[in-house]
Image (spheres, helix red, strand yellow):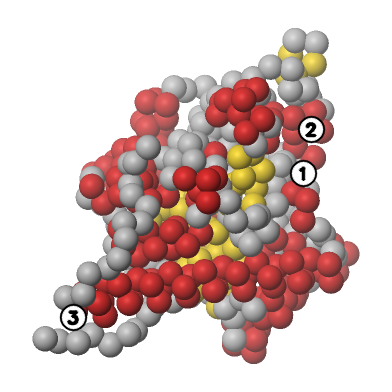
């Protein structure tokens, strides 16, 4: 009998820098953009994070979507109005080394299939700058959306993806980068009726997109940055979703994680169902879509009437909600990842994304203990899952000792 030692593998815990968009005031950072990264790296060290997911976005003066229309404002911590050259990279890398903080990946979350050709070109050009910056920083991945062409059906969007997104993935391949897609359906991105405005929202479309990528030699460039909050929004549970990927041979697709939850409001579901509010939201005035960005924000009632984002650790433990897929069972999330996905946990990033509205405080001193607590919670949950997994599947298994109980099962209802 070969007795295996107890060797749990812990994931790499980090935080998305959009958690505090204006850590560095505009009047300070606009003339010296990289100071925003330096101050966030120092803040991450103080929060207890090992890594940052470096958020990039079009500068507020260049964006086509006003901040007033965004449910979760983006952050251009990585400011790319000017090219990210060797001197800028050297400065950022020195800061990372000083504070012993790493970069998991660079995030740019935008609609890359926008139906306006000029806007699409602008967004693609910016994404190429993000690719260049990531490569110069020695980062292996970029995270973002695919988006949706609103003038086309979903099947037509697959054709559009093949024609216009594959070239982006070839550029990623040329820079030795992986593109990881966050699967948010982005229901409030437009004032129209579409709920799915990011076509890469669920395993069925991930697989369809990956097959297209395989035909063009960029299958290794497309991966998923899984966020369980979006699964809860769509009535899915993590274990069953991971099991489906394993059953279909696509358990390799998930390459990283956002740890952000979603708490379902049963009253909201009773009123509107999982499709969210469809009429009288306030984004349409006098029978037509409003031009006022503050009114356009109401399009997000497709989502917000039935749920609210959770910052890990801030929601009460509710076993019944776990079983109903109405909030994230964090411990089982981490166990299922280890049991069902083709990942190396020690090389996998677990990134805290803060979008709990009531705690989205744009004040460093007030936000600091909130993020410290959430990051500590995420780390301990992952450590607990790693210990359970190592004990059950390695130590006990090596000695022929059965694991007690049944645990949560996929596809069970």
Q: On the picture, is 393 further left or further right than 224?
A: left
- Residue 269 x/y as whole percent: 61, 29
User: Which quadrant would residue 412 be assigned to in this image?
Assistant: top left
The residue positioned 65% from the left and 55% from the top of the image is 316
Q: Are marks 2 and 1 in contact (CB under 8 Å)?
A: yes
- Does residue 305 appear left or right of residue 332 in this picture? right
* Image quarter of residue 47: bottom right
Q: Marks 2 and 1, Cα distance to the nearest angstrom?
A: 8 Å
Which of these two is toward me, 210 or 408?
A: 408
Q: Earlier in the sequence, mark 2 or mark 1?
A: 1
Left or right: residue 319 compared with residue 161: right
Going from the N terminus, do you reach mark 2 or mark 3 first? Answer: 2
Q: Position of residue 204 (x, y in %)?
A: 34, 37
**Along the line of sight, the residue nearer the viewer: 224 or 78:** 224
CB contact under 8 Å: marks 1 and 3: no
Q: Earlier in the sequence, mark 1 or mark 3?
A: 1
Which residue is pictured at 14% across the width and 87% down the height?
2
Q: How far apart are the alpha carbons under marks 1 and 3?
A: 57 Å
| Neighbours of disc 2 within 10 Å: few (<14), some (14-19), many (20+) | some
Residue of label 2? 293
Query: Residue 399 got which mark?
Result: 3
Q: Decide: marks 2, 3 in contact (CB < 8 A)?
A: no
* Disc number placed over residue 315 in the picture, else none: none
Q: Is residue 102 visible?
A: yes
Residue extending furthest right? 27
The residue identified by callout 1 is 67
């Amino acid at each position: 009998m070969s007795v295996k030692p107890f060797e749990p593998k812990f994931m790499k815990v980090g935080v998305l820098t959009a958690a505090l968009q204006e850590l560095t005031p505009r009047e300070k950072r606009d003339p010296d953009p990289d100071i925003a990264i330096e101050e966030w790296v120092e803040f991450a060290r103080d929060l207890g994070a090992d890594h940052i997911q470096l958020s990039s976005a079009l500068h507020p003066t260049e964006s086509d979507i006003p901040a007033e229309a965004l449910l979760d404002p983006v952050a251009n911590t990585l400011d790319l109005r000017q090219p990210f050259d060797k001197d800028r990279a050297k400065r950022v890398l020195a800061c990372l080394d000083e504070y012993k903080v790493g970069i998991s990946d660079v995030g740019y979350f935008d609609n890359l299939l926008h139906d306006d050709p000029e806007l699409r070109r602008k967004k693609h050009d910016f994404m190429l700058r993000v690719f260049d910056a990531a490569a110069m920083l020695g980062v292996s991945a970029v995270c973002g959306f695919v988006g949706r062409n609103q003038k086309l059906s979903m099947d037509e969007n697959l054709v559009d993806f093949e024609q216009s997104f594959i070239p982006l993935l070839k550029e990623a391949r040329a820079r030795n980068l992986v593109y990881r897609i966050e699967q948010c359906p982005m229901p409030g991105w437009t004032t129209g009726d579409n709920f799915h405005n990011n076509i890469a929202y669920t395993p069925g479309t991930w697989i369809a997109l990956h097959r297209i990528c395989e035909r063009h030699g960029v299958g290794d460039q497309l991966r998923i940055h899984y966020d369980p909050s979006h699964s809860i929004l769509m009535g899915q549970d993590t274990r069953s979703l991971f099991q489906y990927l394993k059953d279909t041979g696509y358990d390799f697709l998930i390459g990283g994680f956002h740890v952000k939850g979603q708490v379902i409001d049963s009253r909201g579901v009773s009123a509107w169902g999982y499709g969210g509010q469809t009429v009288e939201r306030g984004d349409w005035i006098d029978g037509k879509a409003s031009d006022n960005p503050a009114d356009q924000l109401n399009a997000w009632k497709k989502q917000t009437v039935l749920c609210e984002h959770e910052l890990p650790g801030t929601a009460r433990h509710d076993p019944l909600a776990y079983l109903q897929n109405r909030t994230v069972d964090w411990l089982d999330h981490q166990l299922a990842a280890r049991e069902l996905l083709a990942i190396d946990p020690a090389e996998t990033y677990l990134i805290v994304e803060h979008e709990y509205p009531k705690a989205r405080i744009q004040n460093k001193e007030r936000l600091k203990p909130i993020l410290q607590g959430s990051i500590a919670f995420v780390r301990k949950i992952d450590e607990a899952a790693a210990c359970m997994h190592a004990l059950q599947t390695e130590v006990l298994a090596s000695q022929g000792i059965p694991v007690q109980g049944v645990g949560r099962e996929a596809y069970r209802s």
